[in-house]
Amino acid sequence: MTTELKGGCYQADNANLSGSSFHNVNLSGATFDDVNLRGTTFHNIAFTGSTIRNACLGDVSIEDASYTGMKIDGIPVTELLRVYRAQPAQEKPLGPAGPSSG
């Protein structure tokens, strides 16, 4: 079922939008609070200038992304990756961020 929404501001409170699909949608400046995004897929997304706070990022995978300017707890991600990649393989932690992931 497709519901066409005209441009403007919308507010959804206590709504179940599971299984929804958003294509060619502008949500810039939107606020998401107490939102369940488990198992969602983001593709071709612009998160430039966004902030994520108080989030559970367990088992999140980021692939084919630009990390320029991205920080985690104030540390540039490009610097974290540079230091990680400079370590010998035997010193790298195993698991999702370890050598077997890509």
Image (cartoon, rainbow, N blue to C red):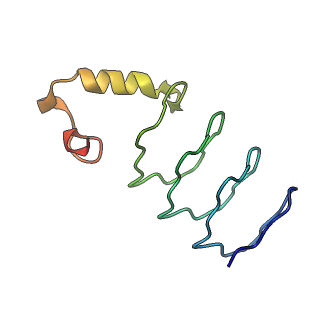
Instruction: Left or right? Give the position of 36 relative to 79.
Output: right
* Image vertical order of residue 9 relative to residue 36, above or below: above
* Image vertical order of residue 21 relative to residue 52, above or below: below
Residue at the far left: name it.
90
* Image vertical order of residue 10 relative to residue 72, above or below: below
Q: How many marks?
A: 0
- Measured from the top left, where is residue 63 in percent x and y? 40, 43
- Measured from the top left, where is residue 49 in percent x and y? 66, 33
Towards the viewer: 100 or 22: 22
Residue under the image location 54 percent in, 51 percent down = 55
Instruction: Left or right? Give the position of 98 relative to 21.
Output: left
Which quarter shows the C terminus?
top left
- Measured from the top left, where is residue 24 in percent x and y? 68, 53
Q: Name the image quarter holding residue 16.
A: bottom right
Which quarter shows the N terminus?
bottom right
Q: Name the image quarter holding residue 77.
A: top left
Towards the viewer: 77 or 43: 43
Instruction: Left or right? Give the position of 95 relative to 54.
Output: left
Residue at the far bottom: name it.
1
- Measured from the top left, where is residue 14 in percent x and y? 73, 74
Residue under the image location 51 percent in, 25 percent down = 68
Residue under the image location 35 percent in, 27 percent down = 81
Residue under the image location 50 percent in, 64 percent down = 38
